[in-house]
Every structure is written in structure tokens, then in C-alpha cells.
Amino acid sequence: MTFAEALRANQSMVFSLAYHFLRDRGAAEEVAQDVFLRLYRKMDDLESAKHVTFWLRKATSHRCIDYVRKRASRRTIALEDTAEPPAVDQQGDPLLNRRLRQLIATLPEKPRMAMVLRYQEDLTPEEISDVLEMPVRTVKSHLQRSLAILREKIERSMGDIR
Amino acid sequence: MEDFERQLKYALARKPEPPAFEAKALAAIAAAKPERRMLWRWDALAASVLIAAGLWAQHQHGLSERAAGEAAKARLELALKITVTELSKIQKTVRTSTEDE
């Protein structure tokens, strides 16, 4: 797999991971560009398309968490003010989707990234544990607690959707 | 999968990358390449400076060794001269005392 092929095949995945985690289009693009620059330097060490995708998910997750930690000391962004990129094929209730994304953005960094990897990339807790380098038990606990928090908040703000 | 989790999947569906993302990424990589070449040039320059400094230090060491050798030779010559002078004086004294007897 050449670098250009890896870029084309994974650009939406990398940008979306960063966007759902950061909720800032400009920051997500900056992080995604940086991740691909790192991939270019690392490309010779990666053996297959699967390995490239795994490396990209891992690099993006860690780069996003670092970005938020550095940014926390500089400035904060009002989440409601950020423009949303258009969805390719939007499903479900758009208002509820938007509210869920806003609530996910309020979760602590690691549980938030675990949620994005689980529901954007459809990864299992074991796969998330490899990407985030944390025990499977911790991943499961982050996911369960985050689901409970989101459910409670969404029920409080929009009514029971179950 | 229950409805709430399905709703989360919809909310976190992949978004398309921004327009011209691929071109910008390739441009960023192209811009980063000369920087790497420049770093290599600085490495080469630093290595040359270190080699030159090493050769100069070696040369200086050689010069100081030669100077030390010259000084030792001069000291030896002086010591020999003093010894010859003293021996002449002793010889003269012995000769004078022998003649007196």
C-alpha cells in the first residue's frame, strides 16, 4: 500500500475521529494533517493496510488527547458555536444526534475517545484496549459509565428515547 | 443493539474530510521534506566542524610536544656546559696542588 492510497482510504476516518472527539473542525483538520505527516515518516515500518488503519486510529486517538490537554491551558471553545461538517448519509433524528455529540464532548478524555472508537469505528472493547493502551476492563467500565451518563442527561433534556 | 446505542452510531457516523484535504496533506509533507534535508546539512556541517577542531587540537598537541623537546635539549646542553666548566676547575686545582708538592 502506497502512502497516497493510505491517505485516500483513511482520511475520512482520521478526520472524523478527531472531529467527534474535539468538536472543532479546524482543530480536527490540523490534527488529521499532523497524523498523516507522521504516517508518511512511519510508512516503511507498516506492513499491511490493516496495520496502517490500526496505526492511524492509535496515532489519532493519542494526538487528540494530547491536543486537548495542551489546549486546556490556552482557551476553551463554546461547543454550540462550532460549525458541523455535513454528514454523508445522516440517519436518525438530526436534533438528537446533535445533542448526543454535544453531550459526548463533555465526557472526560479517555472515556470520550473510547465512545468515539466504539460507535464511529464499531470497535470491540478488546480492540479499543489495544488502540488506547489500557486494560479491557477499564475500557468496558468507561463505556458503561459513559452510556449511563449520556442516557441520564439525554432523558433529562429530551425525554425518554428508549 | 438497543435503540440508544443505534442512535449513538448515527450521531457518531463518519464525516467526510474537508475539501482539498488530500492536497493539503501532500503539500504539508512536501513542505516538511526540505526541512529534513536542511537538518541533514546541519548535521554534516556540525560533523565537519568537529573533525576540523579535532585535527587542530592534534596539530597544537604536536607543536607543544616539539617545544617541550627543544626546551629539554637546551636544559641538557646547559647542564653539560656547567659540568665541563666544573670539571676544568677541579682539574686545574688538582694540577696546581701536584706541582706545589
Image (cartoon, coloured by chain):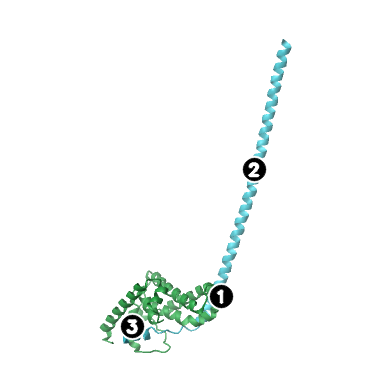
Q: Amino acid at mark 1?
A: Ala
Q: Which residue is mark 2?
A: B65
Q: Quadrant of residue A80?
A: bottom left
Tell me the chain of label 1. Answer: B
Of the 4 image quadrants, the one containing the N terminus of chain A is bottom right
Residue contact between numbered discs 3 and 1, judged by CB atoms under 8 Å: no
Q: Which residue is mark 3?
A: A100
Tell which of B35 and A146 is nearer to you.
Answer: A146
Q: Secondary structure at mark 1?
A: helix
Tell me the chain of label 2. Answer: B
Q: Amino acid at mark 2?
A: Glu
Can residue A158 be seen from the camera position used here? yes
Question: Closer to the camera: disc 3 or disc 1?
Answer: 3
Real-space CA distance between mark 3 and mark 2, rounded to the nearest whole angstrom: 81 Å
Q: In the displayed image of the protein, which residue is found farthest to the right? A: B99
Can residue A23 be seen from the camera position used here? no
Real-space CA distance between mark 2 and mark 1, rounded to the nearest whole angstrom: 54 Å
